[in-house]
Image: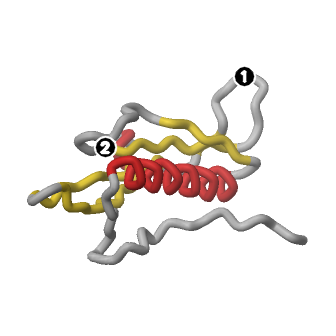
Amino acid sequence: MHPNDRVVRRTFSFTDGDSEQQIVLELELPRPAAAPGSFGSSVRFRVIGEGFPQDGWTTIFGIDEIDALLSSLDTAAVHLRSFADYRKITLRWLGDTNLGLPKAVPYRG
């Protein structure tokens, strides 16, 4: 399997001055955590776009694949919201300000 077969993407848009720009969230599918002695799963993500301050992959760990996936989506959403706040822009997905990413909700078992 080619590494890119394990990557999913979502493209967001924003207006910066007179130009429409795009920023892309890439997320790898969960995999077993690779660190020696570790347990659980990990997910790597990155945001690609002109002006985005962070480059490269960020790795998020979770107890299992779903935990790692949800935690990585939540962390990516925080990165995107912080970028938008800093740049004073509004990110959109499919023309809407709802980016379709989960927001962390504390478990109240």
Q: Which residue is mark 2?
A: 48
* Residue 68 visible at all: yes
Determine the secondary structure under disc 2: strand
Q: Which residue is mark 1?
A: 36
Amino acid under disc 1: Pro
- Answer with left or right where residue 10 lies relative to residue 102: left
> Crowdedness of circle 2 by 10 Å Cα count: few (<14), some, many (20+)?
some
Foreground of the two, 67 or 39 = 67
Q: Is residue 16 above or below residue 97?
A: above
Quarter assignment of residue 22: bottom left
**Residue at figure coordinates x 15%, y 60% from the top left:** 20
Which mark lies nearer to you, 1 or 2? 2
Judged from this view, the residue extending furthest toward the right is: 109
Distance from Cα at disc 1 to Cα at disc 2: 30 Å
Residue 109, x across and y down, in percent: 90, 71
Q: Count the marks: how many?
A: 2
Foreground of the two, 3 or 11 = 11
Residue 92, x across and y down, in percent: 32, 68
Quarter assignment of residue 13: bottom left
Is the N terminus in the top left, top right, bottom left or bottom right quadrant? top left
Foreground of the two, 43 or 1 = 43
- Answer with left or right where residue 27 lies relative to residue 12: right
